[in-house]
Image: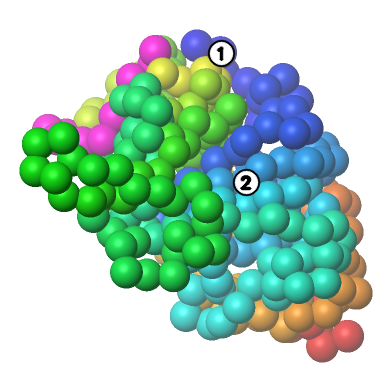
Amino acid sequence: MPELSLSEAIAEYVRDGQTLALEGFTHLIPFAAGHEIVRQGRRDLHLVRMTPDLVYDQMIGAGCARALTFSWGGNPGVGSLHRLRDAVENGWPAPLTIREHAHAGMAAAYTAGAANLPFGMLRGSLGTDLPRVNDEIRFVTCPYTGETLTTVPALRPDVTILHGQRADRRGNVLMRGIVGIQKEAALAARILLVTVEEIVEDLGAPMNALVLPHWVVTAVSWVPGGAWPSYAQGHYPRDNAFYQVWDGISRGRESFTRWMAHHVLGTIDHADFLRSLEAGSATAEEEAAR
């Protein structure tokens, strides 16, 4: 299992046109990887994520995406994702096709992909408007009970990218705290890239910990702070203030483009990105007010 810099991992494994999942549920969201994809100018991506928030808003606004499969999208606790809305409503910077599921549908689709099954089943969506807006949601009759069940096609990303707290030298990855669909998204993918807070000789994993074994991990990159502004349990808290100021930054195309040019495209890596926010010639509040 290779240990690569994040720029090397993205350059080697992420290609234009792929289906790409960056998963994390409030916690351990791989922001650094999303920014590196923007820096390297990837285009025409089908983005998949159960709960797209700021990182996908940034990637969509930067022109990386052609499609989004999801079950909820927003700036948690604040409001809309303005770059996502602009892409859907106005085609800026490029038209975005959306495919919406319920959370249960996304979970069933990832689980089917992880199990190498063609589709997942659930009882949800019956009697809702989701099948009307997503023609991939269909129905089958149970051969045992005659019950009508909902089906969703398996999700099998070309690449899944996760952030974890710790990896060992063999490539085993430890994730602590709240997790969402990360395990299933990892097992469903053809390629799994993981950024971590630290690389150690021994994981020190407690009983019943979530450990991704090295044989499912394609590459690990050491990226301290790689989940900021989301949080990494045991390392740093969620930066709630940034989620609030992002609303102002992302409302306008000019303020968004200026912020991305300065803090993402104008930095060489994630450490440089974090320094730009600490030092920067303008605070997030000043950027939003311009």
Provide the residue designation for mark 2: 47
Q: Quadrant of the C terminus?
A: bottom right
Q: Residue at x 32, y 69 (%)?
A: 127
Residue 10 figure quarter: top right
Q: Secondary structure at mark 1?
A: loop
The structure residue drawn at horizontal position 88% and vertical position 52%, both measured from the top left corner, is 266
Q: Identify which residue, 272 or 97, lies in the foreground.
A: 97
Q: Residue 176: percent from the left, percent from the top?
A: 29, 44
Which corner quadrant of the image does residue 164 belong to? Answer: top left
Q: Residue at x 82, y 88 (%)?
A: 289
Q: Is residue 53 left or right of residue 111?
A: right
The x and y percentages for residue 199 are 45, 27
Q: Residues within 10 Å of mark 2 (few under 14, many from 20)?
A: many
N-terminal-most mark, 1 or 2: 1
Disc number at residue 2? 1
Q: Which mark is residue 98?
A: none
Q: Which residues are magenta?
A: 206-215
Residue at the bottom extreme, as displayed: 289
Whole-Å distance between the Cαs marked 1 and 2?
A: 25 Å
- Going by the numbered disc 1, the residue's amino acid type is Pro
* 211 magenta-colored: yes
Q: How is the image coloured?
A: rainbow
